[in-house]
Image: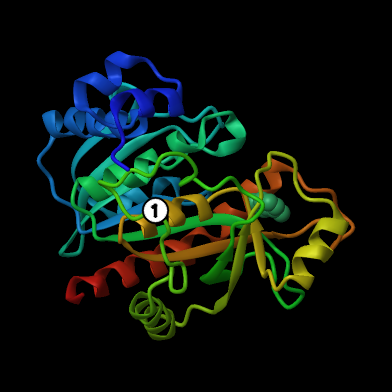
Amino acid sequence: MEKTDEMRINQTGTDKSVTDRTGADPAYAKLLKCCETVRRWTDFKPKVAIVLGSGLGDYAEQIRVETEIAYSVIEGFPVSTVPGHAGRFIFGFVDEVPVVCMKGRVHYYEGYPISDVVLPVRLMKLLGAEILFLTNAAGGVNTTFHAGDLMMIRDHISVFAPNPLVGTNIDELGVRFPDMSTVYDKELQEVIVKAARENQIYLQEGVYAQLTGPSFESPAEIRMLRGMGVDAVGMSTVVEAIAANHMGMKICGISCISNLAAGMTAKPLTHEEVQEAADMAAPNFKKLLTESVKKMVAL
Ligand code: HPA
């Protein structure tokens, strides 16, 4: 059945002026408006979109920067409230590869609608990025992991986080029922494994689960996750991967294991400790990111 404007408005309960102007879903209208604003500042076309997690905030130092755009100048763009997540897009080159890098991301636990949480990833795809490189700090659930390990994400568990595709499907972005059997691209995984091997960086591999946070998990929840086959747990990444997969991006991801998850050590978890551990692992994390992205020039 054809969707009429009236039906869209009734489904989403949004203000008619937004739908009327573009004839689109409000989340899509907002996305297009953000894209238009960025395009007023730069015509840079990135190949790889990089989302920087905790500990990687100063990764911009590895980039030959062309231009930077503060999120705050993009009307409607979600701006993080978490200390250490100050936000801007950095456009430039890692070696010969054109990249856009997100310094700072918003998390669902900050109270943003899930469509806002995934808006930045969608925007980077509209700006031209074909590859999405997700990074985060995560708690190690696998008992063989240590704080400071890097883990390449092989697959994820999304059932504890809201699905960003709930609601009217934005047909312009992708299909209603996207396949999820290979979210993390095999070829990109090979690139990362090769980069790690060539640079003697020890690399774990595994399944990442996103929970909403902001509270850390309980020991019982960690035991449950381990039983489900989860290797690392965090509060980001999966919803972004779902939105990017919907749009047909090639996706890869690395978690920095900043701590062993709740109940695995005697110590209580604090945000500061997670941040400190992520900072300590940062040199290897940055090296692996740079060496992997360099190899993506050939893809
Ligand atoms: N749990 C959830 N998110 C996290 C953790 C954790 O232990 N460490 C870093 N981010």
Residue at 52 percent across and 36 percent down: it is: 84
Classify residue 97 by image quadrant. bottom left
Spot occupied by residue 283 in the image (x, y as percentages of width and height): 47, 62
Residue at 29 percent across and 30 percent down: it is: 4
Which residue does the numbered mark 1 point to in the structure image? 176
Spot occupied by residue 282 in the image (x, y as percentages of width and height): 50, 58
Q: In this view, does 245 lie above or below 298?
A: above
Specify the quadrant that holds the C terminus: bottom left
Q: Which amino acid does label 1 sit on?
A: Arg
Q: In what element is the residue under mark 1?
A: loop
Spot occupied by residue 48 in the image (x, y as percentages of width and height): 26, 59
Specify the quadrant that holds the N terminus: top left
Residue at 43 percent across and 81 percent down: it is: 193
- Camera-side residue of 263 and 207: 207
Spot occupied by residue 51 in the image (x, y as percentages of width and height): 40, 51
Residue at 37 percent across and 79 percent down: it is: 195
- Camera-side residue of 43 and 251: 251
